Image: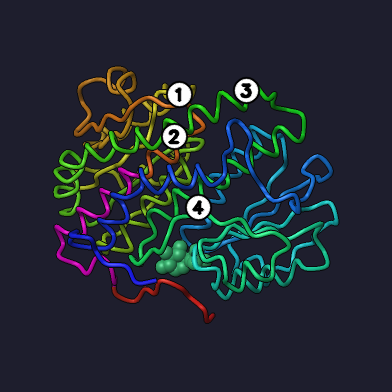
Amino acid sequence: TRVDKAGYKHFMAKEIAEQPTVLADALRAYLDGNTIVLPDTLPDFAKIDRLTMVACGTAFYACLTAKYWFEQLAQLPVEVDIASEFRYREPPITARTVALFVSQSGETADTLAALRYCKGKADSIVSVVNVAESSIARESDVALPIHAGVEVGVASTKAFTCQLNTLLLLALHAAVQRGVMSHDELADKLGELRALPGLFNVALDRDPTMADAAHKIAEARDVLFLGRGLMYPLALEGALKLKEISYIHAEAYASGELKHGPIALIDKNVPVIVMAPRDALFEKTVSNMQEVMARGGKVCLITDAAGAEAAGADVWRTVILPAVDPILSPLLYALPAQLIAYHAAIAKGTDVDQPRNLAKSVTVE
Ligand code: G6P
C-alpha cells in the first residue's frame, strides 16, 4: 500500500493525528454491540494458569501495560519479557501457558525466534500484529490484527495505541471468560472505550501546550519520566520516544523508585515529566513531585483537572487531559508522550521520520 503525508510535515505527525479515526475503526472491527468479536480459535483463558508476553521496543511496553490489565481485570498471572532476553534464557514454558507475541511489523527477528521457542511447549501461540501477512502472524495459532493501517514513521505511535487497544479487548475477554467480570461490567468498560476516540481529539487539542513545553524540554541534556501503575510502562514509552527521535537522553522510573537512585540526578537542569491522572495512587505521586521540586527540578505534569488542582502551584507546566476510566489512561496519555517527543525533535531539527541508527523493522539480530 502506498501512503503519503496527507499534507502533514512528517509521517509521524500524520500518524499521531489520525489516532482518533484509527482507534474508532479498530474498535468497530472488534465490537458488535457489547460483544467482543474474537476468533474462536483463541485458547480458553479459564483453562490456563499463565500468560507469557514477549516483544521488543514499543511493543514490549505495550506488553508491560497489558500485564496490569490481565492481572487486575482477569486475575491471570502474567510474565513479560524482552524477546532477545527470553529466547536465550530458554525459560520453562508449561502446557497451561499461553504465549503471546506483540509486533507491529510481525518480522522482528528476536520476537520470531522467541515464538518458535514456545512452539510445542505452550498451550497455544497468539500474536498481536499490524501486518496480517507477516511471519509472526503466519507462525501463530491465532493472529489478532491491531488495525492501525500502514505505519511509516520509525517511532511507533498509532501502532502503540492500537496494540494497547487490542490487548485491552483481549484482557476484557479473558476477564469475562474466567468469570471475574460480569457482562454488565464489560458493557460499562466498552462504553468508556467507545468514547475514547473523542477524548483523543481533546488530547490532540493540547498540541500548542505540548509544543511549548517540548521546546523548553529540548534544551535539556537529560529528561526523567515518572509514572506509577499503568503510567509506569507509559513513562518508559515516553522516554523511548524522546530518545529515538530527539536524541535527548531520557530515562523512565516508577515514581516509587525515585528515592532509590534517580533523585540524585535532579537539579534545575533536569525536566521531570510526570504522567499521573488523579487515581488511587495520585497522592503518592504528588509527594514524589514535591521531592523533585524541593531540589529545583522542573515538573511537567500530565494529568486531569482534579489532578491539576491537587498538585498545587509549584508545578512548572501542567497539561490537562479529560478524566477517563483508570484502565484507559495508558491509551489517552500516550498522545501527549508522543507529542512531547515530536515537538522536541522539531526543536532539535532531527530527522523525525528516519532517526539516525534506527530501522522500522529489525529483521536481523
Ligand atoms: C524497531 C522499531 C521500534 C519497534 C521495534 C519492534 O526497534 O524502531 O519502533 O518498536 O523495532 O518492532 P515490531 O515490528 O516487532 O513491533
How many neighbours does mark 3 have within 10 angstroms: few (below 14), some (14-19), or many (20 or more)?
few
Please name which of the two marks, 2 or 4, marks the residue nearer to the observer.
2
Q: Are marks 1 and 2 in contact (CB under 8 Å)?
A: yes
Q: Which residue is mark 2?
A: 329
Q: Earlier in the sequence, mark 2 or mark 4?
A: 4
Identify the residue at image location x=75%, y=63%: 91
Q: Are marks 3 and 2 in contact (CB under 8 Å)?
A: no
Q: Which residue is mark 3?
A: 185
Q: Earlier in the sequence, mark 3 or mark 1?
A: 3
Left or right: 274 as drawn, with respect to 58: left
The response on whether ligand 1 sits within 8 Å of label 1 is no
Q: Amino acid at mark 2?
A: Ser
Q: Which residue is mark 1?
A: 279
The answer to which of 300 and 292 lies nearer the viewer is: 300
Separation of residues labelled 1 and 4 (CA atoms): 21 Å
Mark identifier at residue 61: 4
Q: Earlier in the sequence, mark 3 or mark 4?
A: 4
How many neighbours does mark 4 have within 10 angstroms: few (below 14), some (14-19), or many (20 or more)?
many
Residue 80 image position (x, y, % from top left): 63, 53
Separation of residues labelled 3 and 1 (CA atoms): 19 Å
Q: Secondary structure at mark 2?
A: helix
Residue 56 image position (x, y, % from top left): 53, 63
Please provide the residue range marked out in magenta. Answer: 335-355
